[in-house]
Image (tube, rainbow, N blue to C red):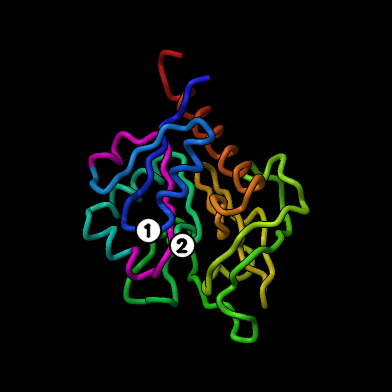
Amino acid sequence: MNAVEVTLIDYGAGNLSSVERALRLLGAETRRADAPAVLASSRAIVLPGVGHFGALMRTLEERNLLAPLREAIRGGVPFLGICLGLQALYDSSEEDLSHSGLGILPGSVQPLPKTAKLPHMGWNQLRRLRPGILLRDVSENAYFYFAHSYAAIGADSAAVAVCDHGVPFVAALEQKSVFAVQFHPEKSGAAGAKVLANFVEFARRESLAGDPVK
């Protein structure tokens, strides 16, 4: 089986190393991108987001990664956003309205309700909305690890699963080659590893399909 090389966006996220380790345990090759030239040749991209929405978008812009990242995603390069990486796909976030998101998906990320315990931190289950690639062969009773106070509240057309914490919010989404999860698969045990494995396998197949010589 040919290994796929996964490019991790390096903007100083605290969970980058743990995501990197999790992918390597699955047999994927990894490299870090902190400059635009690396993105141009990427076959799969992961945005391992933690932190503040504004800080993420500002750092991507300062490192000249914003435009090539949008171009790669819109060009069909398999993309996986994790936690803040999911939120970055939308037009904006109420966490910092002075910075625009990637604009891949319409709408604005909102704060979870103050009536719920914040941040939403710990283990929770998902409610499946439709079949998808990321959650294939993952038990419907599986728990995943969350750590966030903002979310894509409700369920848009890209959502494959939601989670409930005060309100339902998008927990996993898929739209063509765009994938994202609000939980942290790298901290979610066997279920999280399976989610990452499903993405890696999708990226591997896409990579092989794009090669003129198999």
Whether residue 45 sits left or right of residue 35 in the image: it is right
Whether residue 130 sits left or right of residue 179 in the image: it is right
Count of numbered tags: 2
Can you tell which mark lies on residue 13? Answer: 1
Can you give x and y, in whole percent of width and height, for residue 114 in the image?
A: 59, 86
- Which residue occupies the foreground of this view, 105 or 192? 192
Residue at the (29%, 55%) spot, across then down: 66
Q: Residue furthest top?
A: 213
Q: Is residue 28 above or below residue 7?
A: above
- Which residue occupies the foreground of this view, 123 or 37? 123
| Label 2: element kind | helix
The residue under label 1 is which amino acid type? Ala
Residue at the (47%, 63%) spot, across then down: 87
Q: Is residue 53 magenta?
A: yes
The residue under label 2 is which amino acid type? Leu
Q: Is residue 12 magenta?
A: no
Q: Which residues are magenta?
A: 37-56
Residue tagged 2: 84
- Can you tell which quarter of the image residue 20 is in? top left
Can you give x and y, in whole percent of width and height, for residue 95 in the image?
A: 43, 76
Can you tell which mark lies on residue 42? Answer: none
